Image (tube, grey):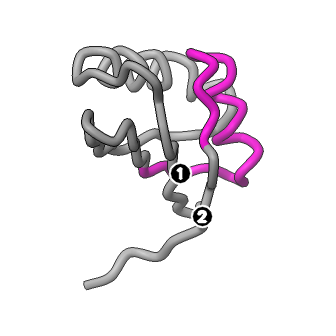
Amino acid sequence: MPLYMDIHHKVEGLTADAVMHAHEADVQTQEKYGVQYLKYWFDEGSGKVFCLVNAPNKEAAATVHREAHGLEADEIIEVQEGV
């Protein structure tokens, strides 16, 4: 299954607690779309969030975010894991 990194450039009012709850909502929603949100990284100061996700396609990954919490990514990039 393809691996993607999604990028949210500026989430207003971002906090560690808010991003944790958003990730939990993704995990609760992901199964019906064949998606697996693996990890996330964030910077409260800039409002940036990065999510690593296995998904059949970009659209499925975006659908999970949209349904789970409404915070859609600004970019979704297919990536490959390095050694």
Query: Helix, strand or loop at disc 1?
Result: strand
* CB within 8 Å, label 1 to label 2: yes
Neighbour tally class for label 1: few under 14, some 14-19, many 20 plus, Cα within 10 Å: many
The spot of residue 49 in percent (x, y) is 40, 42
Label disc, if present, on residue 77 of the rendered structure: 2
In terms of image quadrants, where is residue 77? bottom right
Label disc, if present, on residue 71 of the rendered structure: none
Mark toward the start of the polypeptide (1 vs 2): 1
Whether residue 30 appears in magenta in the rendering, the answer is no
Instruction: Identify the residue shown where x is 68% and y is 32%.
Output: 33
Neighbour tally class for label 2: few under 14, some 14-19, many 20 plus, Cα within 10 Å: few
In terms of image quadrants, where is residue 70? top right
Query: Helix, strand or loop at disc 2?
Result: strand
Q: Which residue ends up furthest to the right in the rendered image?
A: 59
Give the number of callouts: 2
Label disc, if present, on residue 6 of the rendered structure: 1
Q: Is residue 82 left or right of residue 37?
A: left
Whether residue 59 appears in magenta in the rendering, the answer is yes
**Over which residues does the magenta segment extend?**
52-73
The spot of residue 66 in percent (x, y) is 68, 24
The spot of residue 19 in percent (x, y) is 34, 24
The spot of residue 11 in percent (x, y) is 47, 30
Q: Is residue 36 above or below residue 29?
A: below
Tell me which amino acid carries mark 2: Ile
C-alpha separation, residue under disc 1 versus residue under disc 2: 6 Å
Instruction: Identify the residue shown where x is 63% and y is 33%.
Output: 72
Tell me which amino acid carries mark 1: Asp
- Location of the N terminus (image quadrant): bottom right
Q: Which residue ends up furthest to the bottom in the rendered image?
A: 83
Q: Is residue 34 left or right of residue 53?
A: right
Instruction: Identify the residue shown where x is 42% and y is 51%.
Output: 52
Q: Nearer the viewer, residue 55 or 78?
A: 78
